[in-house]
Amino acid sequence: MQRVINLKELYDKDFSMWAEINLELLKEKAYHLVDWENLLQEIEDMARSELKSCVSHLAVILEHLYKYEHLRHLTYGGQKGGYGWIKSIVNSRLAIRSILRRNPSLKEKLPIELEGAWEDAKDAIRAWLKLRGYKPEKFHLPERCPYTYEQAMEYEPWEAEL
């Protein structure tokens, strides 16, 4: 019992050592000594982290699609936006596809997160506007995401301009 208590304390003090000891306990099949509470939490967090990463990339895609289509006319330092946003969209799509190849179960979960990603995108757009001296409330960003998941992953409004 003392070893279990020490493992729980070790979790906060030296995570790497905690992980190594739990791995050894599992290999030895000493299941009764494993810090199950924290181990299960870590497994749950690992599963969530890949989805969280995809949602973050999706938010960047939505932000930059929207800015490209609706805010490109705003100048900052005499330059219009555009190419950097395209590059960011392409890179974020590639990152999502890479994660989905390694975690196919997320293919069904990510589209469900579209509205949450849009909320994050709106926050980023408002911050971007404010940094450029604009009043974000004057831009009336859509309450609901103006793009479908398919559009977020495939739509290229710049193609018509190339």
Image: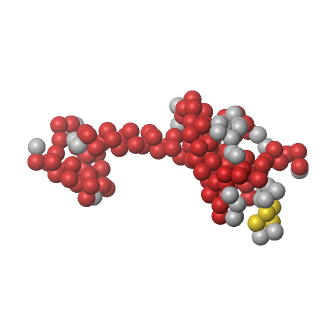
Q: Looking at the image, how many numbered discs can be counted on the residues?
A: 0
Vertical order, 6 against 29 (above or below) = below
What colour scheme was applied to this rendering of the protein? secondary structure
> In x, y percent, where is residue 115?
60, 37
Q: Quadrant of residue 117?
A: top right
Instruction: Return the residue nearer the eye: 142 or 43.
Output: 142
Q: Is residue 109 above or below residue 157?
A: above
Q: Is residue 46 visible?
A: yes
| Residue drawn at 22 percent across, 54 percent down | 10
Q: Residue at x 68, y 58 (%)?
A: 135
Q: Residue 6's spot in the image, x, y percent?
A: 16, 51
Residue 57 on image: x %, y %: 60, 47
Drawn side of residue 36 relative to residue 145, left or right: left
Q: Quadrant of residue 41?
A: top left
Q: Is residue 118 left or right of residue 1?
A: right
Quarter the N terminus occupies: top left
